[in-house]
Amino acid sequence: MTVPAAIVGSIALSLGATPAAGVEREVRAPGVPGALPKAFAMRPGAVPQLRPHAVEAPGSHVVVSGDSVFAIAQRFGLRTADVLAWNGLSSSSVIHPGQVLVLSGTTVAAPAAPTPPATVVAPPPTAPVAPAGSHTVAAGDTISGIAKKYGTTVPAVLAANGLDASSIIYPGQTIAISGAPASAPPEPAAPPAAPAAPPAAASTHTVGAGDTISGIANKYGTTTQAVLDANGLTRSSIIYPGEVLTLPGAMTLAVATVPAPAPAPAPAGPPPQQSAVLDAEQVANAHLIIGIGRQLGVSQRGIAIALATAMVESSMRNLDWGDRDSLGLFQQRPSAGWGTEAQVSDATRATQAFYGGSGDPNGHLTRGLLDIPGWESMPFTEAAQAVQISAYPDRYGAWEAAAHQWLAALG
């Protein structure tokens, strides 16, 4: 079916979407197809892939070298999406040896890695402590906190371990201590008569499952960049449940002046809406998404969610590149169980996997829109995020109005 130029031109404004996961790159158009796919039928060979030897999942799992979230989920008969959600991770998160992952939905934060009691001897309260030659990282530790504990500096600790300000430390890692004085300075015997300093709760935040840097910044009335700078992080850094973040100095006053309990904030308005004039390649992919949705019996709103997701993830193009190993129309990752590189690059199969349900070519390995309980009553952006588990979940809602316009014009 060929779409008249008048219809293509009627779909508002200018193209502004970029692939998800913060990739600032020029979108490469692989070519403009001259005609639409011949049929939207599911491939005859697309059958659920079952894991015949899944081991009963324990409550948690300690990551070892070579592990991935997908491999751990497959080993214990779990969905990759569930393991990510239970541990506050996104599809772009990195796991490390020694990290503890929760393998059930009953715990909201990963448990702290146990510290062997024999490695630390508590000194008398009044005696200065000689700096240790090394420190074993525990949940919640930061480079600045370790440096302060041993009376040294952050640059000295980073240099002694070959790290930089964007490096990540994780429970169980051994950090060399260098540049410390002969003995750590003793704490004052008693606080001065001046007013006490603000409590730690006003200057730090303990990361919980699902937390993001931008969300923490919004919660405390500061900016994302200020939180990154206060903790020596970059926009590519990853935070973990249990980690303690230092809040910017301006934050202390903001927190101290808010009465408890704080009044409920006014409901946030809808995100600014984006729009785009679709070219021939994008129109063809939109027809594919709509046609498969119709065949699977997906509602108008569900098809609109799929259209908006494809626009955010790939500018509605079947890309042969993306963040990490993400590929295709929906930027699905082979390492997260969405299929082989060839399979996620197949636009028809990728669309069927996004919708999920009984027609999901991945079977139970992944979770599509139709597999999300209550997705129809979720806000637009939350329903898309439940499938994609993106590091930027707010982007989908910005295309809600445009997606419904495309559906009305092309469907």
Image (cartoon, rainbow, N blue to C red):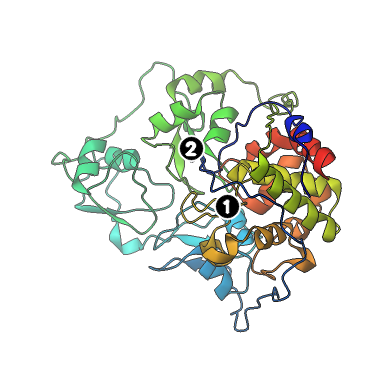
Label 2 Cα crowd, 10 Å radius (few <14 / some 14-19 / many 20+) = few
Quadrant of the rendering where the C terminus is positioned:
top right
Q: Secondary structure at mark 1?
A: loop
Residue 338 in sight here: no
Kind of residue at badge 2: Glu
**Disc nearest the viewer among 2 and 1:** 2
**Residue lying furthest left:** 182
Horizontal relation, residue 161 to residue 300: left or right: left
Q: Nearer the viewer, residue 53 or 336?
A: 336
Q: Residue at x 69, y 71 (%)?
A: 363
Q: Residue at x 23, y 53 (%)?
A: 134
Residue 372 pos. (x, y %):
75, 56
* Earlier sequence position, callout 2 versus callout 1: 2
Residue that mark 2 sits on: 26
Residue 287 pos. (x, y %):
75, 49
Residue 65 pos. (x, y %):
38, 68
Measured Cα–Cα span from mark 2 to mark 1: 15 Å
Picture layout, residue 190 above or below residue 150: above
Q: Nearer the viewer, residue 291 or 59?
A: 291
Horizontal relation, residue 84 to residue 122: left or right: right
Horizontal relation, residue 107 to residue 147: left or right: right
Kind of residue at badge 1: Gln
Picture layout, residue 74 above or below residue 235: below
Residue 232 in sight here: yes
Residue that mark 1 sits on: 331
Label 1 Cα crowd, 10 Å radius (few <14 / some 14-19 / many 20+) = many
- The reply to whether discs 2 and 1 touch (Cβ–Cβ < 8 Å) is no
Q: Secondary structure at mark 2?
A: loop
**Residue lying furthest bottom:** 53
